[in-house]
Image (cartoon, rainbow, N blue to C red):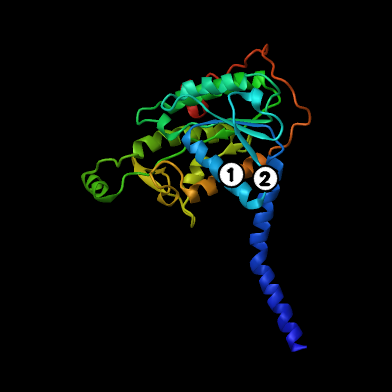
Amino acid sequence: MRRRATATILTFVAALWSTPVQAGEATVRAELEVLRHRRILLGHQSVGGNVLDGLQALAREEGVPLRVVEVASAAQVSEGVFGHLLVAENGNPRRKLESFAAALDGGGVDPEIALVKFCYVDFGADTDAAALFAAYQATLAQLRARHPATTFVHVTAPLTTVQGGARAMVKSLLGRPLGGVAENARREAYNALLRQAYQGREPVFDLARVESTRPGGGAVTASWDGRPVAALAPELTDDGGHLNAEGRRRAARALLDVLAAIPPDAEPRRARPDAEPRRASPRAPGGGAP
């Protein structure tokens, strides 16, 4: 009798330890199964490639045949294809918007999901975040009118690490800003506008929040003008900007959660090239200039 009770307790304890892991794996697999039947178009550059690498690694681990294909336009995105393309060009985010719009307008059946991601190099210390966000909103308004069956996912701009080591210590003693902080401040100004406009209303892939959260929890920040500004966690990168294996996995997992939660489009539709583009709001959220 005592042996039976002991065995029952051990089985129960083992179940307590194993259930969270198994449940997590089951969720990932289920979400990947949803994703592999969707038509998706992503415009990106190198950090987007990092996220896709992480997504494909998850799919291999779970044995889910996810088709990630580099395409030239939406015309090549058929059912079950996660299409992606490099949008020209790094350092010119407005041209990236134009490049993405041209790819999405490329004909065929509208993708169910579309998203365009800026890169950290698209932001400098003097970037007008409000003006760039207004340009993003204007582009999205036009694309929504021409592609009414497509759900657009909004992506926050990725971050970089801030300067460390002896030079950073000297700068801090002299009261000078650390390298990378001013640029991250501009990225986060853009991200704040994006979150304010869309969080809780439309799908948002908050890449910046994933990047600025340490693996053990806790936000990574640096001081700028007396306030904290998010920065890329050093544990998630090997070069200060791109994602390492841990960073790729975390970002991919977050993107997977967002994409899998989007309801499927019941009826695939073709683009409407004759649609009148909708006008964006004359002012960016948060009172920024257009």
Eyeballing the image, is 219 above or below 82?
below
The reply to whether discs 1 and 2 touch (Cβ–Cβ < 8 Å) is no
The amino acid marked with disc number 1 is Leu
Residue 247 located left or right of residue 162: right
Residue 243 located left or right of residue 147: left
Mark number displayed over residue 139: none
Eyeballing the image, is 229 above or below 89?
below
Q: Quadrant of residue 148?
A: top right
| Depth order, front residue of 31/58 | 58
Which residue occupies 51% across, 26% down? Answer: 87
Percent across and percent down for residue 164 are 30, 48
Q: Quadrant of residue 113?
A: top right
Q: Quadrant of residue 131?
A: top left
Percent across and percent down for residue 12 are 71, 73
Query: From mark 1 to mark 2, how far is it between C-alphas?
Result: 9 Å
Q: Which residue is mark 2?
A: 32
Which residue occupies 68% across, 32% down? Answer: 39
Percent across and percent down for residue 29 are 68, 50
CA neighbours of label 2 inside 10 A, class few (<14), some (14 to 19), many (20+): many
Could you tell me if residue 288 is visible in this image?
no
Q: Quadrant of the N terminus?
A: bottom right
Could you tell me if residue 30 is visible in this image?
yes
Q: Which residue is mark 1?
A: 55
| Depth order, front residue of 245/283 | 245
Tell which circle, 1 or 2, labels the residue nearer the N-terminal end.
Answer: 2
Eyeballing the image, is 164 above or below 216?
above
Which residue occupies 44% across, 37% down? Answer: 188
Residue 267 located left or right of residue 21: right
Which residue occupies 49% across, 26% down? Answer: 133
